[in-house]
Image (cartoon, grey):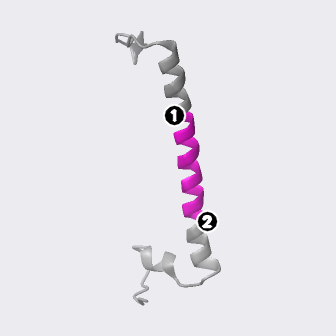
């Protein structure tokens, strides 16, 4: 097996382990995508619903100095 033109040995794992690892990686990827979406949704909620200037306070380019 080759990666980037370099010969590497294939790990001697069973098919069941490979399927379990694939399932875990698929689930972990979906969870990470969900958490990222939740994070973006929370930031937008702070900006447009709660209007607490959280995004402006986090930005290094903002002159917002107000604190809660």
SS majority, magenta:
helix
Q: Earlier in the sequence, mark 1 or mark 2?
A: 1
Residue closest to the eye, 14 or 37: 14
On the rendered structure, is 19 left or right of 1? right
Q: Is residue 47 above or below residue 31?
A: below
Tag 1's secondary structure?
Answer: helix
Q: Whole-percent x and y of residue 42?
A: 57, 69
- Quarter of the C terminus within the rendering: bottom left
Marks 1 and 2, how far apart at CA: 24 Å
Q: Whole-percent x and y of residue 8?
A: 34, 12
Q: Is residue 59 above or below residue 38?
A: below
Residue under circle 2? 41
* The residue stretch that appears in magenta: 25-40
Q: Whole-percent x and y of residue 25?
A: 51, 34
- Residue drawn at (54%, 22%), measured in percent from left and top? 19
- Residue drawn at (52%, 83%), measured in percent from left and top? 53
- Quarter of the N terminus within the rendering: top left
Tag 2's secondary structure?
Answer: helix
Q: Residue extending furthest front?
A: 16
- Is disc 1 in contact with disc 2, using a CB cutoff of under 8 Å? no
Q: Whole-percent x and y of residue 24?
A: 52, 33
- Residue drawn at (60%, 71%), measured in percent from left and top? 44
Please tell me the numbered disc located at residue 25.
1
Q: Residue extending furthest right?
A: 49
Membership of 27 in magenta stretch: yes
Alpha-carbon neighbours of circle 2 within 10 Å: few (<14), some, or many (≥20)? few
Q: Is residue 34 above or below residue 41?
A: above
């Amino acid at each position: 097996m080759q990666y980037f033109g370099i010969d590497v040995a294939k790990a001697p794992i069973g098919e069941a382990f490979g399927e379990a690892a694939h399932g875990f990686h698929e689930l972990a990827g979906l969870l990470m995508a969900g958490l990222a979406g939740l994070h973006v949704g929370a930031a937008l909620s702070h900006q447009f619903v709660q209007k607490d200037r959280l995004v402006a306070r986090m930005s290094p380019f903002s002159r917002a100095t107000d604190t809660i």
